Amino acid sequence: MSGVILAVDDSASMRQMVRFTLEGAGYKVIQANDGVEALELAKTSGADLVLTDVNMPRMDGLTLVRELRALDSYKYVPMLVLTTESGQDTKMRGKQAGATGWIVKPFNPEQLLATIARVLQ
Amino acid sequence: MSASTAESTKGASPAAAAAGFTPELQMANMLGLCEAQMESAIHDSDKAVDALIQAFTCLVDTSRSVNALTAQLPAEIKETVGAGLSQQVEAISKQMASAVVAFQFYDKLSQRLGHVRYSLSTLALFVCDRAQTTSPDQWRRLLNTLRRLYRTEEERQIFQSVMEGIAEEGPVTIAALQEGPAGVQVGEIELF
């Protein structure tokens, strides 16, 4: 597998778990602590996929998705939301913001990799 | 007199207020104590889990190095020990995948305890104002605030079980929720 994945989560341990999983499969992982940091990072280093949490300080994940979708370079980049939230309302807001999919934590490494491979096709 | 004490003595009898004692203030102090205990416990366990994750990171790196070294073994050695080594590395990888799922439960636990802490401090502020505590509308507003706070499936189920089925069945339903199916449950995936 190849590609650059931007992983966004305010929990350092969650970022570590995502990094282990993705690097083990051959992806390059860049990380951000919140939406603001992710937006800056996304502008300077192109990502092939964005994997973001929802509840974060400064800028939440759904705002991040919306902001990224407004950029020409991220119009068609897959964006997956990885969150503990499973409510239909929040999912719907994610879909409206432009998210490609919704993954409820805890993720299964194999299923996460299969989903990423699928949306990157 | 501090602002919170002044707030908490609103509506109390002059004698009780003068002595700095009100049931509301005592309740707020007790809730504050619970919140502080919880914060301290979370802080300590965060440190322990950080150390565990550091150790796990080293294990992952070592496992990957062994895997890379196995791939570089000369053909004659690969024939004798290569297959065995690969099997062992594969077994370690499977265990690590299980550990990745388990670590995420700690993250979820921290988040849920954070919500409980927020609930306790919100309630502590609320009970200090007698004008609020005597108003059913204010209680409903507080309940709605807490409802919005609990966003994971487990939190929502417990909220519903306790607050909407608040009668005698409450604790029984929570126990049933906690039993759940055997094994570690992972979250759902939905593509839009």
Image (cartoon, coloured by chain):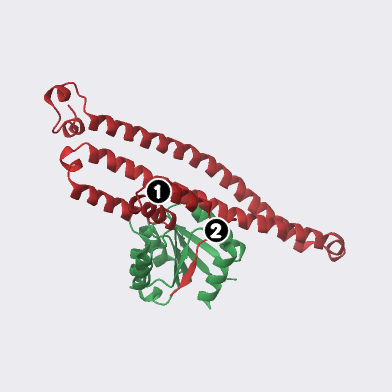
Whole-percent x, y for residue B149 in the image: 33, 53
* Residue depicted at 43% across the width and 58% down the height: B153
Return the residue nearer the eye: B138 or B8. Answer: B138
Compared with residue B14, is residue B40 higher up or lower down, i.e. above or below? below
Q: Nearer the viewer, residue A26 or A90?
A: A90
Q: Which residue is mark 2?
A: B185
Residue sitting at 40 percent across and 49 percent down?
B169
Residue A24 seen from this side? yes
Q: Secondary structure at mark 2?
A: loop
Q: Nearer the viewer, residue B60 or B35?
A: B35
Q: Residues within 10 Å of mark 2 (few under 14, many from 20)?
A: some
**Camera-nearest label, 1 or 2:** 1
Per the model, the C-alpha gap separating discs 1 and 2 is 24 Å
Chain designation of label 2:
B
Which residue occupies the extreme front position in the image?
B168
Q: Which mark is residue B153?
A: none
Q: Amino acid at mark 2?
A: Gln
* Badge 1 vs badge 2, beta-carbon distance below 8 Å: no
Q: Position of residue B60 (x, y in %)?
A: 64, 53
Task: Name the residue rendered at 68%, 52% in the picture.
Answer: B62
Q: Tell which chain the image draws in red.
A: B
Q: Is residue A81 left or right of residue A70?
A: right
**For residue A91, which quarter of the picture?**
bottom left
Classify B77 as above or below B137. Answer: below
Q: Is B58 placed above or below B42 here?
A: below
Q: Earlier in the sequence, mark 1 or mark 2?
A: 1
Task: Give the numbered dot on residue B170.
Answer: 1
Where does the N terminus of chain A fall, quadrant-wise? bottom right
The answer to whether residue A12 is seen in the rendering is no
Colour of chain A, in one word, is: green
Which secondary structure lies at badge 1?
Answer: helix
